[in-house]
Image (tube, rainbow, N blue to C red):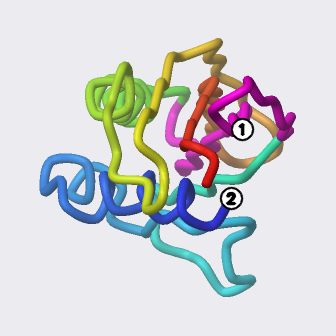
Amino acid sequence: MEALLTGLYNLYANNSTLTAAIPGGLFVGEAPQDTSSYPYGVMFVVSNTPGWTFTEDIEDYLIQFNIFDEVGEMDNSTILDVFDKLTTVYDWCKPTVSGYSRVFIKREFGTILRPDDAWQISVSYRCEIEKSRS
């Protein structure tokens, strides 16, 4: 699990367009309580199901990205721009996942919400990683 999350985080950290679009940072699990720089994001594991064949071990994950931005005069253009940049980087991406030889990632769904005083987009990806058995 850690290898996949590290690989996905590195795609964010090594992409100047995406880091500029999410200047508040991308956090794994949850954002710190004092996070006040918008937009910011949180990436976490929704589910994990192991699988196997006679020769490979397979891990099937559902990973969700939640991106938050301030509400301003009903203007959601910033959060929609972040959605476009996020999906450009992560749709069908090939992150380096240490110890795994095959990585398959596809977007499952995305949604935009306005809970409380912030815009939120949620984007989920199906991630399948595979490694040979020793």
Which residue occupies 71% across, 53% down? 44
Amino acid type at mark 2? Met
Tell me if residue 109 is in the magenta stretch.
no
Kind of residue indicated by mark 1? Glu
Asked which quadrant contains residue 123, the reply is top right
Tag 2–tag 1 contact (CB < 8 Å): yes
Q: In the image, is 36 to the left or to the right of 122? A: left
Left or right: residue 53 compared with residue 78: right
> Which residue is farthest left?
16
Q: Residue furthest bottom?
A: 34
Q: Residues within 10 Å of mark 1 (few under 14, many from 20)?
A: some
> Quick check: 30 above or below 117?
below
Nearer the viewer's eye, disc 2 or disc 1? 1
**Looking at the rendered structure, which numbered label has been put on residue 93?**
none
At mark 1, the secondary structure is: strand
Q: Image check: 29 left or right of 69?
A: right
Q: Position of residue 120 (x, y in %)?
A: 64, 37
Residue pictured at 60% horizontal, 78% vertical: 35
Q: Earlier in the sequence, mark 2 or mark 1?
A: 2
Report how far apart the C-alphas of labels 2 and 1 lie in the structure.
9 Å
Provide the residue span drawn in magenta.
47-73
Label 2 secondary element: loop
Closest to the observer, 122 or 94: 94
Q: Which residue is more in the foreground, 118 or 120?
A: 120
Q: Is residue 70 magenta?
A: yes
Q: Which mark is residue 59?
A: 1
Disc 2 target residue: 1
Classify residue 69 as left or right of residue 93.
right
Where residue 84 sits, quadrant-wise, is top left
Q: Is residue 23 above or below residue 60?
A: below
Percent position of residue 1, x then y = 68, 59
Residue 34 pos. (x, y %) = 66, 86
